[in-house]
Image (cartoon, rainbow, N blue to C red):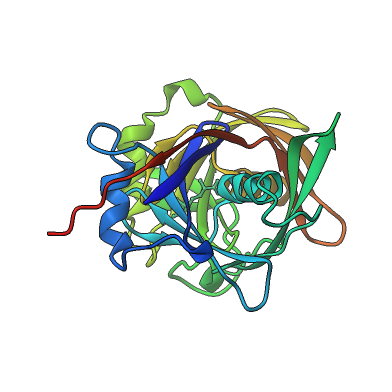
C-alpha cells in the first residue's frame, strides 16, 4: 500500500490516497494500529484515508492509532489540503473536505510560490452538553466540577465535531498528563470518550496547552483541541477571541470570529513516501 507520511506540528499521520486507485484493504480499523505502531510499523498518531466524495472535493477519514475512528482532525486536514494542492490533485485555494463533522474548508496560504500555511474554517463550536456528548442535565458545560478518582477538575466541554474536555490550570508543569489524561478520556460522563486539554493562560492572547488525545494518548499537537481551548478561554472570560496556542510541537493561531466560526492557521509538512506491506493472514 502506497502511503505518504505527514505531520502538523509533530502530530503525525499516515496518509493513504484510497480514492485514487490505491488498493485499500477493508480491515483498516485493524490495520491502523499496526501501521501506526512506532516500532513494528511506520509510526504515527493516526491513519488518514482520502476517498472520493459526492459532495466535496474529497472525503477524509481519520483512524486513531488505537483503531477508533474520529469525526475530525485539525492537524490532519491541513496536511491533506497541502498534499492535494502540491500534488496537483485539487489545485484550488479553497478545498472542500467531507468529514464526519461536516464539510470543512481549508484555505491554502502561499508565500514566494510555496504553501506557507493552511487556514481552516473549522466551523462553529458545539457547546450543548448532548452535542459533546456528555451525560447530565441540558445546558453548556462551562467551568463545571468533574470528579476523577477523588480529585475535582473544573472542566469546560466543547465539541469540534469530536469531544474535548478543557481544564485551565495555574501551572502546566505539575500536571501528570499520562496519569490523569486516560482517566478523563474514559470517564463515564463522556459516552464517546473525550480528548483532554490542560491549559495555562499566559496572557489574554497567548496560552500554552498539552493534550491527551482520545485513541492516541499524548500527542505533540491537536488542531481541534486548540480550537476547543480558544473557545473555552472566551467562555470562561480568560482570553480574547484571537489567540496563539502553544503546543509541545509548535504554535497555532486560532480566531473565534464574530460570525461564530473558528479559523485555525498553522503549518503542514510532508515528510516521506513509502510502501507498506500488508500480509494477509
Ligand atoms: N489530532 C487531531 C485530533 C484527532 C482525533 C482525536 N484523537 C479524536 O479521537 O477525537 C487534531 O489535530 O484535531
Identify the image quadrant of residue 99. Answer: bottom right
The image shows residue 126, relative to residue 12, as above or below, that is below
- 137 or 66, nearer to the observer: 66
Residue 211 is at least partly visible in this image:
yes
Look at 28% across and 49% down and name the residue there: 33
Look at 86% across and 62% down and name the residue there: 259
90 with respect to 257 (left or right) = left
Look at 63% across and 37% down and name the residue there: 268
6 with respect to 105 (left or right) = left
Q: Count how many numbered circles sit on residues in the image.
A: 0
Residue 43 on image: x %, y %: 35, 36
- Split into 4 quadrants, where in the image is the C terminus? bottom left
Identify the image quadrant of residue 240. Answer: top right
Residue 179 on image: x %, y %: 30, 35
Q: Residue extending furthest front?
A: 21
- 124 or 177, nearer to the observer: 124
147 with respect to 161 (left or right) = left
Amino acid at each position: 500500500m502506497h502511503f505518504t507520511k505527514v505531520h502538523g506540528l509533530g502530530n503525525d499521520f499516515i496518509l493513504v490516497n484510497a480514492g485514487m486507485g490505491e488498493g485499500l484493504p477493508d480491515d483498516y480499523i485493524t490495520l491502523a494500529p499496526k501501521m501506526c505502531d512506532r516500532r513494528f510499523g511506520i509510526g504515527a498518531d493516526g491513519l488518514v484515508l482520502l476517498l472520493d466524495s459526492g459532495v466535496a472535493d474529497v472525503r477524509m477519514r481519520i483512524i486513531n492509532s488505537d483503531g477508533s475512528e474520529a469525526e475530525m482532525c485539525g492537524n490532519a486536514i491541513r496536511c491533506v489540503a497541502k498534499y492535494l494542492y502540491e500534488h496537483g490533485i485539487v489545485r484550488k485555494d479553497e478545498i472542500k473536505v467531507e468529514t464526519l463533522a461536516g464539510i470543512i474548508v481549508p484555505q491554502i496560504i502561499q508565500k514566494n510560490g510555496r504553501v506557507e500555511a493552511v487556514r481552516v474554517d473549522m466551523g462553529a463550536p458545539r457547546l450543548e452538553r448532548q452535542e459533546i456528548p456528555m451525560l447530565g442535565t441540558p445546558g453548556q458545560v462551562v467551568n463545571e466540577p468533574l470528579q476523577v478518582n477523588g480529585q475535582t477538575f473544573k472542566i469546560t466541554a466543547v465539541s469540534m465535531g469530536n469531544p474535548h474536555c478543557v481544564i485551565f490550570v495555574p501551572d502546566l508543569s505539575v500536571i501528570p498528563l499520562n496519569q490523569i489524561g486516560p482517566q478523563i478520556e474514559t470517564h463515564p460522563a463522556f459516552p464517546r470518550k473525550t480528548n483532554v486539554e490542560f491549559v495555562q493562560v499566559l496572557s489574554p492572547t497567548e496560552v500554552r496547552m498539552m493534550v491527551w488525545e482520545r485513541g492516541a494518548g499524548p500527542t505533540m499537537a491537536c488542531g481541534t483541541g486548540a480550537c476547543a481551548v480558544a473557545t473555552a478561554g472566551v467562555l470562561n472570560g480568560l482570553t480574547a477571541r484571537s489567540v496563539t496556542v502553544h503546543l509541545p510541537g509548535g504554535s497555532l493561531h486560532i480566531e473565534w470570529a464574530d460570525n461564530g466560526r473558528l479559523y485555525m492557521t498553522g503549518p503542514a509538512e510532508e515528510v516521506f513516501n513509502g510502501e507498506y506491506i500488508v500480509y494477509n493472514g
